[in-house]
Image: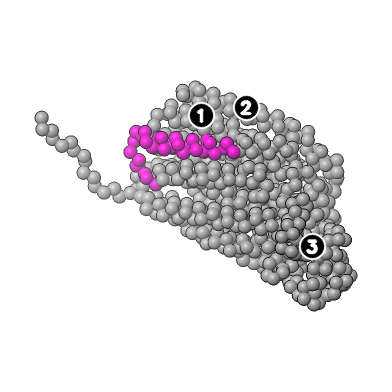
């Protein structure tokens, strides 16, 4: 850590971690709802709908905190200056946390906008917008004051600006249900397959550059091609959500073709990671951070690229749309692309903020492997449940609950995998909050053998 | 490839996609009015949408395929269950799903809100959305019914039973829902004529019946399914 204000990031990360744990705990409760019969009296008070609102909003909240923390860590190094106003950064952190917690408590009492993922009531939306403006102002002013522009920080700022703008489309009440979903996807799809990808690509490029010592010009060249492809495929690719909503049928073509190309930039991201490893100029000091970075690139491709591609074509999507197949893809993609990216930046930045050059990664390693394996199992069990649902309900035309009765077993297996995931996560959180230097065994310095000349 | 070329790939790639997307958005706006029958978007339908959001229905149910996957899709729910079936389930979920492994919360929804919700669901059901979902598609499911009758030598009534949602609540030989009783031997309990009346309007046979009237069945379907059930002894 070279700049004092990079410390701000630490508090964003610390705030994000317990929210991640809570998200997973509520996720387990959702799996219980699928596997067992929850009594009517409990359902009346704490319904599946409320729990799902918790699960998804916690996801958005902790990930945005991670992205913002990552930004506060990266921007000083990229601009070679301190953050414009640390006080504003802390005010904004507290404002976001208070808003988030208020929203969650509100859900328990039925205070909701009632639209999936955008449940936060409109009154609170305005607080979120004000928080976003403070954040963008603070980061923007830091860059303007330093006047040292790089592709990485440009992409980061662009992604965050795009992210904030898109949020506005989720705020109005739309009379027409079709138009409602049309713009709902401007928030959801253009976030995760647009703005968030920009932020991810920028953070990832920064970490790659710092860890491998590969030349900035090379890293930034790849970055431009990647974000170019992300935007080219991702923007019109929004159309793969417009197949069955009552939009014109040309979306089957535009959505199908553009979204089928969406794995390309992710493949490129994996390739350039591998390329940079080969050409690295530095020894890898912290193998776990490195495992996270490579794991993120691979999992991103599997979850978002492969599982997304699997049901993006309209001929397949007609049967899989709105089934547990979507859930399988959603979990693998969010974990692979965004949870692992956040954990990568946590493991990259937190030791440095604490002044630990090489950290002890034994606990963290258990955490990484438990979480990734558990998530792959969950992706597969959701997938099996989804195939059963698709076949029994949509092909054979039997009732919804008939299909669900066959899926129950697989939701139970998901619950078990989820418990393992929570275990891995607790290891990881404990490890991140109590990082300690590794005890490096005494190394004998390498000596040139005497020559015989 | 130089960094400059890479930058141009980014710039023009983004601009091309953004311009195309905005143009398609503009065109979609022009077509949605016809596709969604926006002229029938009455104040009642809009009030129904507000109620739908007020009770956060969408985090358990999907509509147009989006939302929670915990409960059935609501896009064509009025066609599937009939307006009365929808009302009964929203008003008394504790009774409607008493035997089901999955419950729906009792929310104390007013009669006015109930009317609005039904109006909203009826309106959504008419949206021209490419015949989705497949499980409610008359074209696809009548094909499935034909296959069943042709392939397995089943009576047309059995096909109606399997494809018209009876199995959402009732089971046969262990397959199906358990909201209502299993019908393995229903022919012993009720004769053909009573079965017909019961399916048409359950309360006409048993005033305490909780099953909704199956008004969506045509006369031929009703006769066929009643004959099938009467044969189960």
Residue at image point 29% right, 48% down: A440
Q: Return the residue at label 2.
A: B16
Q: Quadrant of residue B55?
A: bottom right
Binning the other alpha carbons within 10 Å of mark 1 as few (below 14), some (14 to 19) or many (20 upward) gives many
Report if the CB atoms under discs 1 and 2 are less than 8 Å apart: no
Q: Position of residue B212 (x, y in %)?
A: 82, 64
Q: Position of residue B164 (x, y in %)?
A: 77, 60
Residue at image point 67% right, 32% down: B21
Q: Nearer the viewer, residue B171 or A55?
A: B171
Q: Position of residue A62 (x, y in %)?
A: 55, 47
Q: Return the residue at label 3.
A: B156
Residue A224, numbered circle: 1
What is the chain letter for disc 3? B
- Looking at the rendering, the stretch of residues picked out in magenta corresponds to A260-288
Mark 1–mark 2 Cα distance, whole angstroms, equals: 15 Å
* Chief secondary structure of the magenta portion: helix
Residue at image point 66% right, 58% down: A392
Report whether mark 1 lies on the same chain as mark 2: no
Which comes sooner in the sequence, label 2 or label 3?
Answer: 2
- Reply above or below: A277 against B198: above
Residue at image point 69% right, 62% down: A401
What is the chain letter for disc 1? A
Mark 2–mark 3 Cα distance, whole angstroms, equals: 55 Å
Q: Position of residue A331 (x, y in %)?
A: 56, 50
Q: Quadrant of the C terminus of chain B?
A: bottom right
Q: Quadrant of residue A47?
A: bottom right
Q: Nearer the viewer, residue B88 or A187?
A: B88
């Amino acid at each position: 850590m070279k700049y004092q204000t990079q410390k701000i990031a630490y508090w964003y990360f610390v705030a994000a971690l317990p929210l991640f744990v809570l998200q997973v705990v509520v996720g387990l409760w959702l799996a219980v709802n699928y596997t067992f019969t929850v009594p009517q009296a409990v359902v009346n008070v704490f319904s599946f709908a409320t729990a799902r609102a918790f699960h998804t909003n916690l996801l958005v909240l902790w990930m945005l905190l991670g992205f913002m923390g990552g930004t506060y860590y990266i921007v000083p190094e990229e601009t070679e200056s301190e953050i414009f106003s640390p006080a504003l950064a802390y005010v904004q952190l507290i404002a976001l946390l208070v808003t988030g917690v208020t929203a969650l408590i509100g859900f328990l009492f039925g205070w909701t906008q009632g639209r999936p993922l955008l449940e936060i009531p409109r009154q609170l939306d305005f607080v979120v917008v004000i928080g976003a403006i403070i954040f963008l102002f603070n980061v923007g002013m830091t860059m303007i004051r330093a006047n040292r522009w790089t592709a990485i920080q440009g992409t980061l700022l662009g992604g965050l600006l795009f992210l904030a703008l898109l949020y506005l489309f989720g705020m109005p009440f739309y009379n027409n249900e079709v138009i409602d979903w049309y713009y709902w996807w401007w928030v959801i799809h253009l976030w995760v397959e647009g703005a968030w990808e920009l932020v991810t690509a920028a953070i990832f490029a920064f970490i790659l550059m710092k860890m491998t010592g590969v030349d900035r010009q090379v890293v930034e060249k790849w970055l431009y091609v990647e974000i170019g492809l992300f935007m080219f495929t991702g923007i019109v690719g929004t159309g793969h959500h417009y197949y069955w909503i009552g939009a014109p049928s040309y979306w089957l073509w535009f959505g199908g073709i553009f979204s089928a190309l969406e794995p390309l930039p992710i493949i490129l991201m994996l390739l350039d990671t591998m390329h940079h490893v080969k050409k690295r100029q530095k020894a890898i000091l912290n193998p776990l951070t490195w495992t996270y970075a490579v794991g993120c690139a691979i999992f991103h491709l599997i979850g978002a690229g492969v599982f997304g591609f699997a049901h993006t074509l309209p001929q397949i999507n007609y049967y899989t749309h709105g089934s547990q197949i979507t859930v399988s893809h959603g979990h693998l993609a969010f974990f692979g692309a965004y949870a692992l990216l956040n954990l990568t930046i946590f493991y990259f930045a937190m030791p440095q903020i604490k002044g630990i050059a090489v950290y002890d990664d034994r606990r963290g390693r258990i955490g990484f492997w438990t979480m990734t394996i558990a998530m792959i199992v969950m992706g597969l069990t959701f997938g099996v449940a989804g195939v059963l649902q698709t076949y029994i309900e949509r092909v054979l035309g039997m009732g919804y609950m008939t299909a669900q009765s066959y899926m129950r077993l697989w939701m139970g297996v998901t619950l078990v995998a989820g418990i393992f995931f929570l275990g891995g996560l607790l290891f990881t959180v404990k490890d991140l909050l109590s990082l300690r230097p590794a005890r490096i065994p005494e190394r004998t310095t390498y000596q040139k053998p005497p020559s015989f000349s | 490839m130089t960094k400059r070329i890479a930058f141009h790939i980014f710039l023009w790639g983004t601009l091309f996609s953004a311009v195309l997307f905005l143009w398609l958005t503009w065109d979609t706006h022009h077509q949605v009015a016809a596709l969604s029958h926006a002229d029938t978007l009455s104040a009642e339908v809009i009030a129904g949408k507000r109620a739908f959001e007020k009770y956060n229905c969408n985090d358990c149910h999907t509509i147009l395929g989006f939302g929670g996957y915990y409960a059935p899709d609501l896009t064509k729910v009025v066609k599937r269950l009939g307006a009365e079936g929808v009302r009964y389930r929203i008003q008394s979920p504790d009774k409607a799903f008493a035997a089901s492994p999955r419950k729906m919360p009792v929310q104390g929804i007013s009669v006015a809100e109930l009317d609005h919700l039904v109006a909203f669901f009826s309106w959504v059901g008419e949206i021209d959305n490419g015949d989705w979902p497949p499980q409610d598609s008359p074209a696809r499911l009548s094909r499935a019914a034909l296959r069943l009758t042709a392939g397995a030598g089943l009576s047309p009534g059995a096909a109606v039973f399997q494809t018209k949602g009876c199995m959402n609540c009732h089971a046969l030989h262990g397959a199906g829902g358990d909201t209502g009783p299993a019908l393995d031997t229903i022919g012993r309990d009720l004769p053909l004529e009573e079965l017909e009346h019961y399916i048409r309007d359950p309360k006409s046979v048993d005033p305490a019946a909780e099953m909704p009237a199956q008004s969506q069945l045509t006369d031929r379907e009703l006769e066929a399914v009643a004959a099938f059930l009467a044969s189960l002894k």
